[in-house]
Amino acid sequence: MIVCQFISRGITNSHLYAHLKRLPACQTMTRPSSDLAAFRKIFSKAQSIAVITGAGVSAESGVPTFRGAGGYWRKWEAQSLASPETFSRNPSRVWEFYHYRREVMLTKDPNPAHLAIAECEERLSKQGRTVTVITQNVDRLHRRAGSKNILEIHGNLFRTRCMSCGHEADNYKSPICTALEGKGAPDPKIDDANIPVQNLPRCEQKGCNGLLRPAVVWFGEALDSDILTRAEQVLDSCDLCLVVGTSSVVYPAAMFAPHVAARKVPVAEFNMENTPATERFKFHFHGPCGSTLPPALARHETETEED
């Protein structure tokens, strides 16, 4: 499956359309349905549901996406800061950027879309049915909403990795270190703090004290093969797939749902706009995910209150 063929971030539009055209035909290429009742009928029978989420679902919580227009922090293109090369050259600037993002995330709450997915997962688990979230987001809002069955393919902001010993650990400190307190404001008129590297976040493992970095997947880095393998297993076995708030233009996630559709499995897209893959899906529900998703995942009439 194509999941394991694309293992680095940042591969976008340039080849997406060509790959979509080469996918096996899964159905007549007709306009996707917006018939909620028809979706709900399929949903009521699904035993294994894959939910692929992207930046759009978190944007409704007020989380900056740093994509497209406005994707800058100070005068720097945000994506240029998310690279091992930039961290090697200027770890202080990169940590300011990620400290700002961490602090922003701590002020945001899960929205109705996050909560609907979490409630659905818990409810269906009691019926012997599974819901697995495969997310491109690094904000952990799904976990805060109550979801437990999650694959974070790009890592998360509240986890660090030591550059020396490789130790990874969750880290919710605010600020993450004393030197970063009050730093990271995005105003382009603010100069870099130029924090000495020895004062940046350091490993607390005994005898280490190595420089920490955010445990997120940067552009040019390989995705975690174990997580990709687990995602592939979920996508190969699901009997319903939801695509929520993702533009479907970044590999490998851009290919997840189209390959599910190629197996003739129903795919429902929930988004504010059409994407390059929309016409391959059975359903498309236009609008804010926080409005369209809760009624789609609510308790079905065939479910009993005891379930």
Image: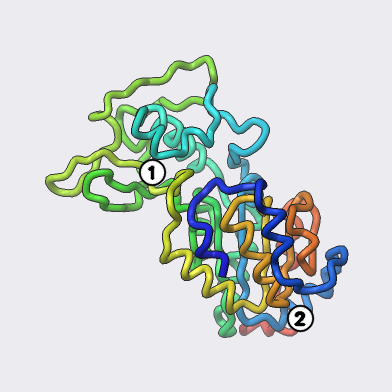
Q: Position of residue 63 (x, y in %)?
A: 59, 42
Q: Position of residue 177 (x, y in %)?
A: 31, 34
Q: Position of residue 3 (x, y in %)?
A: 54, 64
Taking depth in this image into account, of 262 and 78 the one nearest to the observer is 262
Name the side, left or right, on which 267 lies relative to 227. right
Sort mark 2 into few (<14), some (14-19) or many (20+) by Cα contacts within 10 Å: few
Marks 1 and 2, the one that precedes in the sequence: 1
State which quadrant residue 269 falls in.
bottom right
* Quarter of the figure that contains the C terminus: bottom right
For marks 1 and 2, give the one nearer the viewer: 1
Residue labelled with disc 1: 214
On residue 23, the disc is none
* Quarter of the figure that contains the N terminus: bottom right
Q: What amino acid is at disc 1? A: Pro
Taking depth in this image into account, of 179 and 269 the one nearest to the observer is 269
Q: Is residue 67 above or below residue 146?
A: above
Residue occupying image coordinates x 66% and y 70%? 241
Q: What amino acid is at disc 2? A: Glu
Taking depth in this image into account, of 102 and 16 the one nearest to the observer is 16
Q: Secondary structure at mark 2?
A: loop
State which quadrant residue 194 falls in.
top left
Sort mark 1 into few (<14), some (14-19) or many (20+) by Cα contacts within 10 Å: many
Q: Position of residue 99 (x, y in %)?
A: 42, 35
Q: Secondary structure at mark 1?
A: strand
Cα distance in 3D space between marks 1 and 2:
44 Å
Residue occupying image coordinates x 62% and y 65%? 51
Residue labelled with disc 2: 301
Residue occupying image coordinates x 83% and y 75%? 38
Q: Are marks 1 and 2 in contact (CB under 8 Å)?
A: no
Name the side, left or right, on which 97 lies relative to 14. left
Residue occupying image coordinates x 26% and y 51%? 166
